[in-house]
Image (spheres, coloured by chain):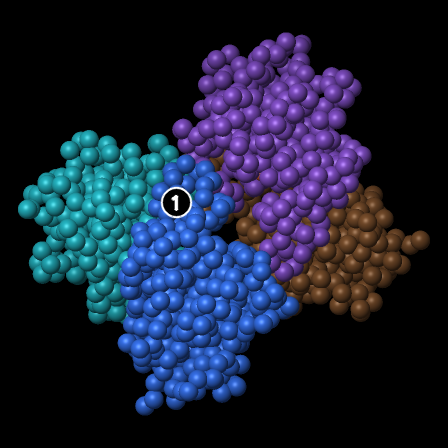
Chain colours: A brown, B purple, C blue, D cyan
Amino acid sequence: MSSLRILFLGDVVGEPGRKAVIAQLPRFREEEGVDFIIVNGENAAGGRGITPRITIDLLRAGAAVVTTGDHVWDQPEIVDYFPTEPRLLRPLNYPEGTPGGGSVVLETAKGKVGVVQVQGRSFIQPPLENPFLAAEAEVERLRADGVNIIVCEIHAETTSEKIAMGRLLDGKASFVVGTHTHVQTADERIFPGGTGFLTDAGMCGPEDSVLGRSVESVVWRFRTGLPTRFPVAKGPVRLCGAIVDVDTETGKCISVRRVSHLVEAEAPEPAAATPQTL
Amino acid sequence: MSSLRILFLGDVVGEPGRKAVIAQLPRFREEEGVDFIIVNGENAAGGRGITPRITIDLLRAGAAVVTTGDHVWDQPEIVDYFPTEPRLLRPLNYPEGTPGGGSVVLETAKGKVGVVQVQGRSFIQPPLENPFLAAEAEVERLRADGVNIIVCEIHAETTSEKIAMGRLLDGKASFVVGTHTHVQTADERIFPGGTGFLTDAGMCGPEDSVLGRSVESVVWRFRTGLPTRFPVAKGPVRLCGAIVDVDTETGKCISVRRVSHLVEAEAPEPAAATPQTL
Amino acid sequence: MSSLRILFLGDVVGEPGRKAVIAQLPRFREEEGVDFIIVNGENAAGGRGITPRITIDLLRAGAAVVTTGDHVWDQPEIVDYFPTEPRLLRPLNYPEGTPGGGSVVLETAKGKVGVVQVQGRSFIQPPLENPFLAAEAEVERLRADGVNIIVCEIHAETTSEKIAMGRLLDGKASFVVGTHTHVQTADERIFPGGTGFLTDAGMCGPEDSVLGRSVESVVWRFRTGLPTRFPVAKGPVRLCGAIVDVDTETGKCISVRRVSHLVEAEAPEPAAATPQTL
Amino acid sequence: MSSLRILFLGDVVGEPGRKAVIAQLPRFREEEGVDFIIVNGENAAGGRGITPRITIDLLRAGAAVVTTGDHVWDQPEIVDYFPTEPRLLRPLNYPEGTPGGGSVVLETAKGKVGVVQVQGRSFIQPPLENPFLAAEAEVERLRADGVNIIVCEIHAETTSEKIAMGRLLDGKASFVVGTHTHVQTADERIFPGGTGFLTDAGMCGPEDSVLGRSVESVVWRFRTGLPTRFPVAKGPVRLCGAIVDVDTETGKCISVRRVSHLVEAEAPEPAAATPQTL
Ligand SMILES: [Fe+2]
Ligand SMILES: [Fe+2]
Ligand SMILES: [Fe+2]
Ligand SMILES: [Fe+2]
Ligand SMILES: [Fe+2]
Ligand SMILES: [Fe+2]
Ligand SMILES: [Fe+2]
Ligand SMILES: [Fe+2]
């Protein structure tokens, strides 16, 4: 049985997050034998969105696909970059005509790999089209095109949407993984139909933080209700995600293992300049 | 150094969940040497709320304290039961005059143990008073009363509120733990001030489910947007929570260990009779 | 110039509301010379949804079309009734395959009249597909089919969605009207392209109430955060809506006049049996 | 019987709104015989918040009290200005220690007038303390201090909170009025206990707009889900609010009359520079 090893890394937060990711990707390839890397970059630019430059840096460092989420448009320059880079995804369930795409198929030495991203609709903005219908149709389209190995990321607030997506795609996708809460869940498993699953990958950001932002700023916000800046935190970065082995013949998941790897700190970037939601 | 061992179990879902909890509590006491047990029972009655009878069963089985959450009032008979049972908590941050209490102190052979529950305010109903100010004041009040060992549960949707609560109470509470998402997180740790933490304990409910409810019903709901019943699922139950050791002198956390224990199925109760939110 | 006079009545609440509507529709036809009547019936059954029986009663009393909203499925028996009655609408922007339809064209002595209903997506459940794209496409489809006179109802919480819908359809629909807040707005007008508009029609329900429910129950809920029943209120009923004159040649709106008519009370029905959101 | 005439004006939007308000206040005093003016200024600074300069301008033009809302902190310089100007209010139901106050009593030739502002909790940020308990306690405190004439503004999204507040304070406040939706409602009335009421005052902003913002930008946002700037619109401004007569002996409301007054355009200010929620 031939297998493909996928590394999925959750929301990269700010300069500390992306420096740590870029520094560690080669190690994951060499030491872990990873074949294919997916990185969620929606918070890579100072916590808010992603730039073309950062996308290029992540791809050069070894990411095959970079995904985003509700923060996708935070850096306006990304809009015009989308048509030039199909390996950068935004949620699939935007209306027709939206810049960029939510699905991509890449050729690898071990066969085609499809990556699909959708966004949930509970407690997350903006309201988008039904992600269950969109993901199901796209995964079936890819399979009809002969793509066996398919990863579907659901960027969502609620655990119910994420688990329901995993069950909906069970037997159709190789791996379904959630992002957006920035906290890794401990429920990795393989569903009966052969689809690997993890409710949330967690983030790649400063350990001493609230979701990657400075502890003091977030605590102060909740105590007072007053607006404030939420600077990206400093110090050691934890890389969170999963390593998944997939049978290249059947596309079924062989194993899901959580990744939670602490990396020493790099020099931080300046704090974000404006108040912002997480 | 003398230590106290606390078992915290997340949201118990329906008859399968409570049967498994009741069957397993003695084992936790004996094999794990647990001194003090806290169980969240907000979904113990067919997935919706808790009854006096179920509360009594959980206490008799060994729980020292039973907590609730946003589903606390789902079974109307619980309102009049609250004044008779101080070991049953509802969130502290309801307005003055609300039946029941959100905090209790119990004497144990190893000293007093305080348990406080608050509810978050992001994406959860009903709107309550500021949980950060409420929890901080209550924990300080307990400490002024000589209570060293304090557990604070935050029943909330968002990871940001839960982590911020842990950091706010760092050095003041022994353990801060979240509930409500029904999925255990993998981020157990001890904060710099000595407070143990886990973003979400997870649930005690059927493994083959979406948050304890039947997979088919939840997937169908998300695909169609149409109302449906969400029967409690069947089959083996996973008990999720944490075991925490606390230094009885200082109240500081010595260790946090996640609990995730699969229990063979018991005979299920009939499905809930009406559509309901999770 | 030939014109058609349309009466639109907002959310009918409970037995008091529907009795008043049924009693008054003949008067509107005779005294006001109304040609075409649209009634929102989403709260007609004890405040929650609508039954086949009530739909039939409203149609017999003179309504040409009965619309609904987020409460459409509250009475389960309505699901199977939908395929038999095209004059009963549910929001158009449900996914394909949903029972019922969101658009209907009826022949009248003065020409075809199209009625379209969509539901907003801010602060209203469930999440549906984009109502702006759906309404625009449907209105254009009707116009391509030779339908000149088109009413579009947007059932939504926010004023921004409702006004934006009116502006989007300006020059394409004859009248755009909002429902769901149960309070009539005072901003009736005709947009530059000839489309009449009213942000919210208001409700047809008991005057001495909060949105048709008993004052005491709703005030108590907000003061305490505790669940309660919200019985339909009693006493005189105010019928709220609008009378709109449309040029039958061009489909353009000639005038919009608000309707706010107090009707003496009828005998009330028993209170609703379970707690419920409004 | 001696009476006091109050003018309440809803959310002033941008330069067009404040220019029109400032120009018209003298006319309201002279032609309408208004004794006391309250203006909601939460969107006066380019649509986002209010500055000290604008507050001073509104007070100088004749406003006795300027209120705010969820946009109160949008202009950071307002924080330090609050302690110097008690006639500028922010919602009362912020936690203790928040800059500014939510209630003020002013002496007039016809007696003391109290103004209280609270913010709702449904679909509006940030989460605050219970506005019903806060308003009730504050109004009773003012009455115990001999203040007869009391206006309570509730800045809220939902009609249910606003009407429930009016009923809760019926017989205690002279006038309860809602703001925030920017659309005037047509339900002005006097409740049985003598309290005047209007669900929403509407805004003081450009007529050809969506809530004061350019039509194109808001429609585009809803069609695409993509972020954009929402520049304040141009053209004639409609001043919306209410004129209320109060019996100075009893504090009871004698009459409530809606104000909706179109004012010719002034030169607009430059468009707001960043995307923003309404
Ligand atoms: Fe996100
Ligand atoms: Fe993120
Ligand atoms: Fe809960
Ligand atoms: Fe729960
Ligand atoms: Fe509705
Ligand atoms: Fe309604
Ligand atoms: Fe506002
Ligand atoms: Fe406003």
| Image coordinates for residue B69, horizontal then vertical, percent | 55, 35
Query: Which residue appears farthest toward the front when viewing the image?
Result: C267
Chain letter for the residue marked with disc 1 in the picture: C
Considering only vertical position in the picture, is C113 above or below D163? below
Residue found at x 63% / y 50%: B229
| Image coordinates for residue D21, horizontal then vertical, percent | 21, 59
Would residue C36 be seen by someone viewing this image from the given angle? yes
> On the rendered structure, is A53 left or right of C12?
right
* Amino acid type at mark 1: Val
Residue found at x 19% / y 55%: D256
- Total number of numbered discs in the rendering: 1
Would residue B148 be seen by someone viewing this image from the given angle? no
Considering only vertical position in the picture, is D147 above or below C83? above
- Residue A232 figure quarter: top right
- Residue B240 figure quarter: top right
- Under circle 1, the secondary element is helix
Nearer the observer, C37 or B132: C37
Residue found at x 35% / y 42%: C216
> On the rendered structure, is A218 left or right of A202?
left
| Image coordinates for residue A111, horizontal then vertical, percent | 85, 62
Considering only vertical position in the picture, is D21 above or below C107? above
Q: Quadrant of ligand 3?
A: top right
Decide: few, some or many residues near mark 1? Use Cα within 10 Å; few <14, some 14-19, many ≥20.
Answer: many
Q: Which residue is mark 1?
A: C218
- Residue B173 figure quarter: top right
| Image coordinates for residue D247, horizontal then vertical, percent | 12, 46
> On the rendered structure, is B175 left or right of A146?
left
Nearer the observer, D38 or C89: C89
> On the rendered structure, is C272 left or right of A27?
left
Nearer the observer, C30 or C89: C30
